Image: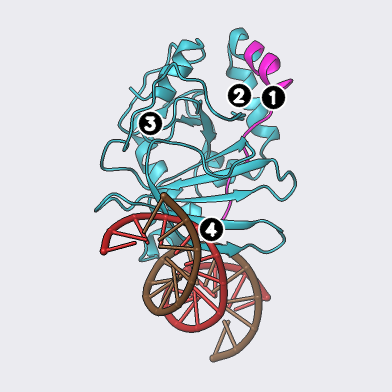
Chain colours: A cyan, B red, C brown
Amino acid sequence: MSSISQAMLSQGLFEDQELSTQMGFFSFPPNLTISTPPFGYHQSLKTLITMPPSLAADAPTSLTETLLSSATQKQKDHITSHFGGPQLLSLQRSSANLRAWGEVNEYCRGSKRSDGDDHDHLRVSAKKMKKIKSRRKVREPRFCFKTMSDVDILDDGYKWRKYGQKVVKNTEHPRSYYRCTQDNCRVKKRVERLAEDPRMVITTYEGRHIHSPSHDEDDTQAPSHLNYFFW
DNA sequence: CGCCTTTGACCTGCGC
DNA sequence: GCGCAGGTCAAAGGCG
């Protein structure tokens, strides 16, 4: 089990949820995907919520409502006490990410619902999926989360090599591109600062590591900087 | 010397 | 088809 999952479970937030450490997916609440980044991430990381772009279009409002409607009182209390209210992860809505979500949807379809409710808005539309499948290039699944930190690089236990930096339109902060230095491991990550709030660092992981972290952090060790995760 | 970052050039996908 | 923006490459230089 990942250290993140342990952290979540230790807080009693998702104690009833079945955990797949291999995929890192939770299924809570039923129509959202709550996931941990791939196993081996830094113990200070907690959790993140991801969702189909179709639902993300209404985020954070719809997600907040959905989350709160199905959250236990304990979870609601946690949201209020830790975040001063339901603040939620911002999500990528780029078309490129649809490809990743196509894969996520395929995975999630394994636990197909039978309640007959209209959940179409939770999935990429058939038209979009057709367009996705018509594309040759298939992207790895992505995990995106936001932290409040003075430093851009979070210690996630893996070694990374920077291979590019790009100034993104409408932002004054450049986006950095990193690749895992492990042989044959093709995991990449992007790091950028939020235009609206430069204190926030957005980290996007693409792909899954095929190896263990290069060094194991002591789970009891305090983080060297403040990570403030939305979920 | 090896590994890393920097940075301009190039490639690719997408919208119009 | 074209232009733009994001993503990647690779040479050059820095650092331990």
Tell me how far mark 3 sits from mark 2, CA to CA.
Answer: 19 Å
* Element class at badge 2: helix
Q: Position of residue A194 (x, y in %)?
A: 67, 47
Q: Earlier in the sequence, mark 4 or mark 1?
A: 1
Q: CB of mark 3 within 8 Å of CB of mark 2?
A: no
Residue A38 placed where, x, y %? 37, 35
Q: Depth check: give the residue in front, A10 or A139.
A: A10
- Residue assigned mark 2: A67
How far is mark 3 from mark 1, CA to CA?
23 Å
- Mark 4 is on which residue type? Ser
Mark 3 crowd level (few <14, some 14–19, many ≥20, 10 Å Cα): some
**Distance of label 3 from label 4 (alpha carbons):** 23 Å
Does residue A96 appear in the picture of this structure?
Answer: no
Q: Are marks 3 and 1 in contact (CB under 8 Å)?
A: no
Q: Is residue A140 above or below residue A200?
A: below
Q: Chain of mark 4?
A: A
Viewer-proximal residue among A11 and A97: A11
Q: Out of A18 and A12, give the one closest to the viewer.
A: A12
Q: Which residue is mark 4?
A: A95
Considering only order in the chain, which callout, 4 or 2, is on the residue closer to the N terminus?
2
Between disc 2 and disc 1, whose residue precedes? 2
Q: Nearer the viewer, mark 4 or mark 1?
A: 1
At label 2, the amino acid type is: Leu
Q: Which mark is residue A112?
A: none
Q: Give the main secondary structure of the magenta stretch.
A: loop
At label 3, the amino acid type is Gly
Label at residue A86: 1
Magenta part of the chain: A77-94
**Residue where numbered disc 3 is placed:** A24
Q: Quadrant of the N terminus of chain A?
A: top left
**Do discs 3 and 4 share a chain?**
yes
